[in-house]
Amino acid sequence: MSYIEVRDLRKTFTVRKKREKGSLFRERETVEALKGISFSVEQGELLGYIGPNGAGKSTTVKILSGILTPDSGTVSVNGRVPWENRKEHVRHIGVVFGQRSQLWWDVPLLDSYSLLKDIYRLPEADYTSRLKELTEALELGGLLRTPLRLLSLGQRMRAELCGSLLHRPELLFLDEPTIGLDAVSKLALRDFLLWENREHGTTILLTTHDMEDIAALCPRVMVLGHGQKLFDGDLQDLLRRFDTTRTVTVRYEPDISALSLPESAAVSRSGSDWIISYAPDQLPTAQLISLLQDAGSIREMTLQPENIDHLIAAMYREMDL
Amino acid sequence: MKAYLSVFRMRLRMETQYRGAMLGGIVCQMFFGLILIALYRALYASKPQAMPLSGVVTYVWIQQAFFRMLAATDSDLADKIRTGNISYDLCRPVSMYGFYYSRAAAQKLTGSLMRAVPMLVFAALLPEGWCISLPASLPGFLLALCALLLGLLCVCALENIMVAFTMRTLDPRGMQGLLTLLMMTLSGNILPLTLFPDSWQKVITLFPYAQLLDAPIRLYTGEYPPSEAPRILLTQLVWILVLVGTGLAMWRSCRKRMILQGG
C-alpha cells in the first residue's frame, strides 16, 4: 500500500445564495468541490497539485490534513485516517498556507518556536539540533529575536517553513508558498524544499499557481478541475500535449508597415515589435524565417517556447475549466 | 499539559508588551472609579443604604481594578476565525479548547493584575470615604483570593462559549455585545450586586456572572463570613464544570461542521 491512498473522495458544500427580490426564503445551492478523486503518493515524493481557482485543491489538502471531513471516500496516510484521529495524524504532518500565518505576530520568532516545541512535545536536544539545522538552511539565524511583524514577506515565509518543519513531519503540505515573493526569495525557497526532500525524505505536496515552482520542484503533477482529476503524471508529458505553438518576436529597422504571412500564423503588434505565433507542424520554422527576412531588414529577433502559463491556460481552456 | 502552560506563558509575555494600553486602562478605570464613588456618596448623603458606604467604595475599586478580567477578549482569535487562520490551530496535536482556554486565562490574568496592583495601591492612598478598606479578616482575604482564581476560571469558560458563537456567525460583535451587557450587569460592574433588592440578590448571586468578581469581593469585605466560604467556592466550582462542559461540547460540534472558506 502506498504512503497516501485516496479513493473516490467526495465533498459537497452548501452555499447560501443571495435572496432574490420578492422571494421569502434564501435559496441553497450545493457545490460539489470534489467529485470522486483517487490517487496515491509514495513516501518521499514531490507532488505538484495544480488547477484553476475553485478546482478543489485546497479542499483536498484540508481533508488530507484532517481539517475537513469528506462526505464519502477513503483516505489513508501511512495507515491513518486524518479526520478520525486528528491529534495523532497532525503530529506527523506539517502545513504552510502561503496566505496565512501560524507564528505569533508580536513576539520574537524564537518564542513562537519554543511554543511549538511544547505543543509537539519535542525533546530539548532534538529541538535544538533541528532548529539549528533549519535556521542555517533557511538563513534565519539573525532573525530569531525579531518579532514576526518586523520581517519582510520573504523572511516571514522562511520563518513559517521553519515553524512547520520543527517537528520533523513526514509529510509537508504547501499551499502557495511562493505567493508574493521576489525572485531571490522564490529561488531560495525552492532550493530549500529540494534540500529538505532529499535530506530527510519528506513527502511534499505542493499546490500553487506558479508554474515555475512546479517545473523546478515537482517531477509529478496532478491537474484538478471541477472537482475531478484530469491529469496525473510527468510534467513534461503534460506540456508536450499542449505545447504546440511557438512565438517569434521581430523588430525591423526601418520598421515596415505591413507583414503578410500564411494564414496559420497569427500576427500582432506591440510597439514596434511584430509578434507572430505559429505552429511549427503547419508552418516550418525555416520557412517562416525566410518569409520574415524577405519582409525587410531584421534588427532583432527572439524565438521563445510557449510560456508555461499560457500553456496551462490553453490546457484549462481545452479541458473546459 | 506542558503545551497549555507554554501557551499561557507566551500570552503573559505578549500582554506585558502592551504597556501603553495598560496605562490608558488604569487612567480610564480610575476615572470611572472616582465618578462612581462620587455618585454613591451623593446617593448616601440623601438616603443611606443597608450596606455601609465604605463597603460600596471597596466594591467599586475592586470591580474597576479587575475590569480587564471581565472585559479583555481575544481579538486575535476572532480574527483567526474570520480569516481562516484558525486552520493552523487545527493542525496541532493539542485540544483547541484547552489551547484557547490557556490563552484567555493568561490574557485576563496579566491584563487585570498589571492594572489592579497600581490601581489598588492608588485607591488605598485616597482620603477617608474615598479609599478602599482593608479586608475584613486575614482568612477572608485568603479565601477571596481563592474565589478570585475560581472566578478567573469561570470567566474564561464564559469567554470560550462566546467564541463558539463566533465560530458559527463569523462575526463576534453581535453575541459579544449581548453577552457583555449581561456580564456587566449581572456581575455587579454597573451597579454593585449588594445594592440590588434582597429578593433579586437571592437569584442573581447564583448566576455564573456573580461568581466572577462579586463572590470574591464579598469575601473580602466580610459580607460573606469565612464560614460561608465552602458554599461560595463550591458554587463557583460547579459553574466552572458546567461552563467548561458546555463550551467543550459547543466547540466539538463547531469543529464537525467547520468549513474553511477560500484557498
Image (cartoon, coloured by chain):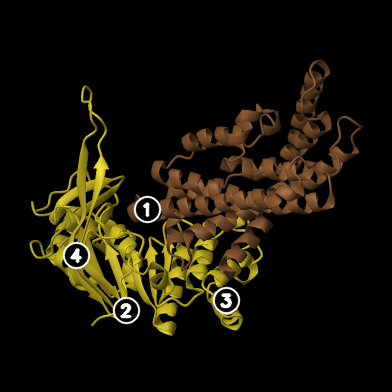
* Chain A tint as drawn: yellow
The circle drawn on residue A37 is 4
Q: Is residue A78 above or below residue B58?
A: below
Q: Can marks 3 and 2 be said to lie on one chain?
A: yes
Label 4 amino acid? Ile
The N terminus of chain B - image quarter: bottom right
The circle drawn on residue A78 is 2
Percent x, y of residue B198: 66, 29
Residue at 13% from the left image edge and 56% from the top image edge? A318
Disc 1 and disc 2 in contact, CB within 8 angstroms = no
Q: Nearer the viewer, mark 1 or mark 2?
A: 1
Please state which of residues A301 and A45 is positioned toward the viewer in this rendering.
A45
* Chain B tint as drawn: brown
Q: Which residue is mark 3?
A: A131
The circle drawn on residue B253 is 1
Residue B89, can we see it?
yes
Label 3 amino acid? Leu
Q: Can marks 1 and 4 be said to lie on one chain?
A: no
Q: Count the numbered circles shown.
A: 4
**Gap between marks 3 and 2, in whole Å?**
26 Å
A196 to the left or right of A128: left
Percent x, y of residue A23: 21, 25
